[in-house]
Image (cartoon, helix red, strand yellow):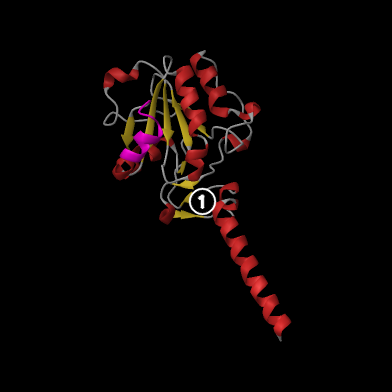
Amino acid sequence: MRIAGVVFILITVLSAIVSIFWYQEMQYLLPTPVPKAYRVVLPNQVIKFDSVLLPQEYAKPKLLHFFSPDCPCSRFNLKHFLSLNKTYGNLADFYVVIAKREDVTSAAYMIEKAVPIIVDKNEKLAKACGVYSTPQAALIQSDNKLYFRGNYNRSRFCTDKNSNFVQMALDSLIANKTPPHFVELATQSYGCSISPEQAHSILQ
């Protein structure tokens, strides 16, 4: 009976460890659950955000960085995002988009006040761009048409230079070229759901 008790305890502890590992790591290796009412937004569709950005800010292409201070994946790629802003900030307007007003302070602290922050009330901007997870980037052409929407990198820390999807798309956008042809991994959403309660698993 003692052996059975020890085995039970070990199984219980192992199960707890696996559960914690899943919650902390494995869940972010799977695609983000798709919102039930999700509407696909294709490249070259006009993105309407007149109530968010001022008309005089339309001259340059824009990078909208959908970010959540509470999302580990958002924190993982923060260094890469800031490096993109430093390199391309004079060529495109960068914005950090957050879903909750209460996240403004923590977001401003984490991005070192390098980029203007937009509070996306009712997720209007996210829905207009077809974004439902963080971190995600939406590149908008100067005529307000969607150029690219997707992931920054196949690696959560953005260490794989061969899959710097957003950087490649930025280079093409600034050079007035057509968007690069990326693998599905570039546009399949990974990370944290903006509205978890409105999502369902695409694996069902």
Element on which disc 1 rests:
loop
Q: Quadrant of residue 110?
A: top left
Nearer the observer, 98 or 6:
6
- Residue type for callout 1: Pro
Q: Position of residue 126 (x, y in %)?
A: 39, 39
Is 49 left, or right, of 7 in this rendering?
left
Residue 150: give x, y in percent of width and height. Answer: 52, 34
Quick check: 166 left or right of 116? Answer: right
Residue most extreme to the right: 3
Q: Which quarter of the rendered picture does the C terminus lie within?
A: bottom right
Q: Is residue 27 above or below residue 2?
A: above
Whether residue 204 is visible, yes or no, is no
What residue is shown at x 51% (from left), y 51% (from top)?
A: 33
Residue assigned mark 1: 33
Q: Which residues are magenta?
A: 105-114
**Residue located 32% across and 34% down the image:** 118
Q: Is residue 110 magenta?
A: yes
Q: Main secondary structure of the magenta part?
A: helix
Quadrant of the rendered image containing residue 2: bottom right
